[in-house]
Amino acid sequence: MDEKMTIDQHRAPIYEALEKFRHMRVVPFDVPGHKHGRGNPELTEFLGAQCVGIDVNSMKPLDNLCHPVSVIKEAEILAADAFGAAHAFLMVGGTTSSVQSMVLSVCKRGDKIILPRNVHRSVINALVLCGAIPVYVNPDVDQRLGISLGMKREQVAKAIEENRDAVAVLVNNPTYYGVCSDIRSIVKMAHDAGMYCLADEAHGTHFYFGAGMPITAMEAGADMAAVSMHKSGGSLTQSSILLTGPNMNAGHVRQIINLTQTTSASYLLMSSLDISRRNLALRGREVFAKVINMADYAREEINEIGGYYAFGRELVNGDSVFDFDPTKLSIHTRDIGLAGIEVYDILRDEYDIQIEFGDIGNILAYLSIGDRSQELERLVSALAEIRRRYQTDSNGLMSQEYIDPEVVTSPQEAFYAEKHSIPIKDSVGCVCSEFVMCYPPGIPILAPGERITPQILDYIEYAKLKGCSMTGPEDPNILNLNVLV
């Protein structure tokens, strides 16, 4: 396939190839073993014959994700054009796989990478895999909301100046709560110092297709960006796209991806990326304008209830909050005397409303292309009723969401070091060798190589008490932690 193909965003090459295949009478003597659903009637009844009928193996007419030469290559070229990237890779291991491939493409053992500590665990997982050394830029914290913000320009400049041997800078664009750093300035600082700039855009797919959105990583000149199409772009769960700029060797990145990504890529996931890219390229501007309007309306209505604070672009300060994602419906709940996770549980258990997450002070309702105004009205009404029924004194509620870590050793060294398990209450002063986090959002409270402090243990105990879903340690009850010997 010639890369000078005619770009037509009305096309969806993988979808088109699967449609053609579906109408052929191919006898399957290959995998998967369900043989177009015939061997698993319960699965076929549950998912539908059309779905299982295109759950097929890589074959010549359908290309191969490990080394695409035809329809998958065409789909990647169209995705690169739609996102304004030099190259786009379809990813079927979630944005975790995209983030890890991004880091592994530029970092090897002993290399330094500058990044905010409020990254998703997938970033630190990548450091465990490759042995790179994190240089953390501890973000500012909004004291009222208790959330971490973006990286200040002067903080990044200081980290670069003090670590001239670092190979890359990584930026969240945006954070889970919708906060954006000044990514254009950070890209320039990184490039001026001879470093790559990487962007975790798991929550920024819509930036590429909506008007009035924060700047995208590719527009800012970043070298790579991990984009979670399934979050706000409408594709199937676990599908993602990895974007690269003109300074990256696409062949090298493909080799890195193939180190860990499956050789049996799901055509359900790939076709969903193909179809969703086409949908966003053709209709994204119109659709996301409606999403912004819905979010603005909901913020206004929720703030009129009293007690809640649905925050937005008024937080922008030109630096640690350089911009704000207008689609994010992040709501501070602490002033009604409830932790965010408590409101999350009440909404689900008593009102049949499932929001994205609740932490100790906030909730996030994730708005995107599939939302409708009537559902937002239901959310607003439920929040008003929860305030009326459950409001109480907020004294005694913990407010701080982010705790600066004390890094003792690299994530890889700590993860693979000799360790032993001790009761969590006895672990103060020890160096942790595993992760502890609330999921979502999946930002580690503790990561391998970090010192365990009383403040961290208080936070873990409080989060467990309030009902946060805690993950990471070997001990599922988190009564014990693995620490370095």
Image (cartoon, helix red, strand yellow):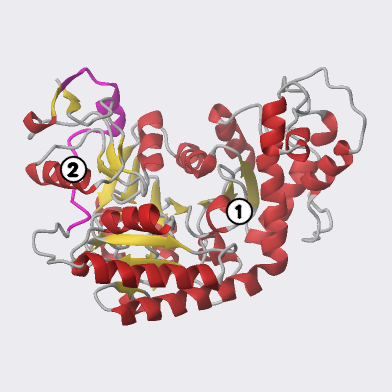
SS for callout 1: loop
User: Residue at position x 31%, y 33% from top?
Assistant: 472
- Residue 415 is covered by the magenta coloring: yes
Screen quadrant of the C terminus: top left
Residue at image x 55%, y 37%?
Answer: 93
Residue 383 seen anywhere in this rendered image of the structure: yes
Q: Residue 417 appears at what percent x and percent y?
A: 24, 21
Nearer-N-terminus badge (2/1): 1
Residue nearest the observer in this picture, 361 or 254 = 361
Could you say which quadrant of the image residue 369 lies in? Answer: bottom right
**Amino acid marked by disc 2:** Ile
Q: Vertically, is 235 above or below 27?
A: below
Residue at figure coordinates x 59%, y 48% from the top left: 241
Q: Position of residue 51 (x, y in %)?
A: 73, 39
Image position of 314 (left or right of 201): left
Picture coordinates of residue 418, whole percent (x, y): 22, 17
Residue in the image at 23% along x and 58% along y: 339
Residue type at the position of mark 1: Pro
Disc 1: which residue: 246
Residue 326 appearing in the image:
no
Mark 2, other Cα within 10 Å: few <14 / some 14–19 / many ≥20:
many
Residue 86 higher or lower than 293, as above or below: above
- Within 10 Å of the Cα at label 1, are there few (<14), some (14-19), or many (20+) other Cα atoms? some
Disc 2 element: helix
Q: Position of residue 341 (x, y in %)?
A: 29, 54
Does residue 451 sit above or below 174 in this rendering?
above
- Give me the disc on residue 338: none
Q: Which residues are drawn in magenta?
A: 400-421
Give the residue pinned by disc 2.
Answer: 460
What is the count of numbered marks? 2
